[in-house]
Image (cartoon, grey):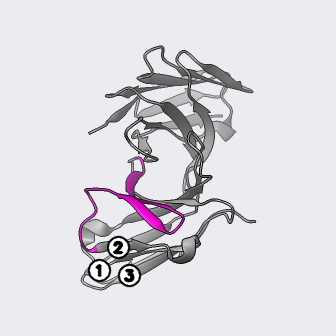
Amino acid sequence: GQQVMQIPQYQHVQEGEDFTTYCNSSTTLSNIQWYKQRPGGHPVFLIQLVKSGEVKKQKRLTFQFGEAKKNSSLHITATQTTDVGTYFCAGETETSGSRLTFGEGTQLTVNP
Amino acid sequence: DTGVSQDPRHKITKRGQNVTFRCDPISEHNRLYWYRQTLGQGPEFLTYFQNEAQLEKSRLLSDRFSAERPKGSFSTLEIQRTEQGDSAMYLCASSLDRRHYGYTFGSGTRLTVV
């Protein structure tokens, strides 16, 4: 079945440093979504990427979808303590219906 | 509309007991999903409804699990004869009936089986 892998599993940064998490799928995706889950909270939708090679920005966050639509990345510039949480990618395929397959997430810790 | 509501927030039950969870989605969302999440893992798909129809069910879902969505509004997830391995956060999410649309998750029900 479809697998979605994320690296790294954990990332500790000093406030102001940049952060990147990478997502790889075993199968070609129709779209990829990114979610953020704060400690003790639930996943919150950040963005969706659909087109090959697509790049989207949300303030300090930059999201990319690979040309082959099998990988994606999330980059945060100049991290802040409010960025703390676990970032999940989640992918759909053309045959998965509306099922999203989530990666295991990257847990980000920001030291002030 | 206050988003997706789940009840209860926490449930502690003895092994072998039955439990039922409720989810109230965003009113205009006709897609509803149940996921399960254990510590340090991403959400794992359980089942999906479009309106009242259960369209997909994970192979991981044993016969002890059943979900309903009568009238296409709220949904219930029942676990019969609970086992310690059922301990997890059960998340409900809803979305519009449109491909490539993000989910809105509820706060979840944390189940502990003792």
State the residue position of label 3.
B19
> Are the residues tagged 2 and 1 within 8 Å (C-beta)?
yes
Whether labels 3 and 1 share one chain? yes
First in residue order: circle 2 vs circle 3: 3
Q: Position of residue A7 (x, y in %)?
A: 40, 28
Where residue A97 sits, quadrant-wise, is top left
Q: Is residue B69 above or below residue B103?
A: below
Marks 2 and 1, how far apart at CA: 8 Å
Q: Which residues are magenta?
A: B42-64
**Residue B43 magenta-highlighted:** yes
Secondary structure type for disc 1: loop
Residue B18 position (above or below residue A84): below
Residue A87: percent from left, percent from top: 52, 38
**Quadrant of residue A49 in the image?**
top right
The residue depicted at 54 percent of the width and 36 percent of the height is A33
Amino acid type shown at disc 2: Ser
Q: Is residue A39 left or right of residue A92?
A: right
Q: Viewed as shown, does residue B57 lie left or right of A46? A: left
Residue at numbered disc 2: B66
Disc 1 crowd rating (10 Å Cα; few below 14, some 14-19, many 20+) is some
Count residues near mark 3 (Cα–Cα under 10 Å), then give few for <14, some for 14-19, many for 20+. some
**SS for dot 2:** strand
Inter-mark Cα distance, 2 to 3 = 11 Å
Chain letter of the residue beneath label 1 in the structure image: B
Counting residues from the N terminus, which is met first, the one under dot 2 or under dot 1?
2
**Mark seen at residue B80:** 1
State the mark number for residue A105.
Answer: none
| Subunit bearing disc 3 | B
Q: Position of residue A99 (x, y in %)?
A: 43, 47
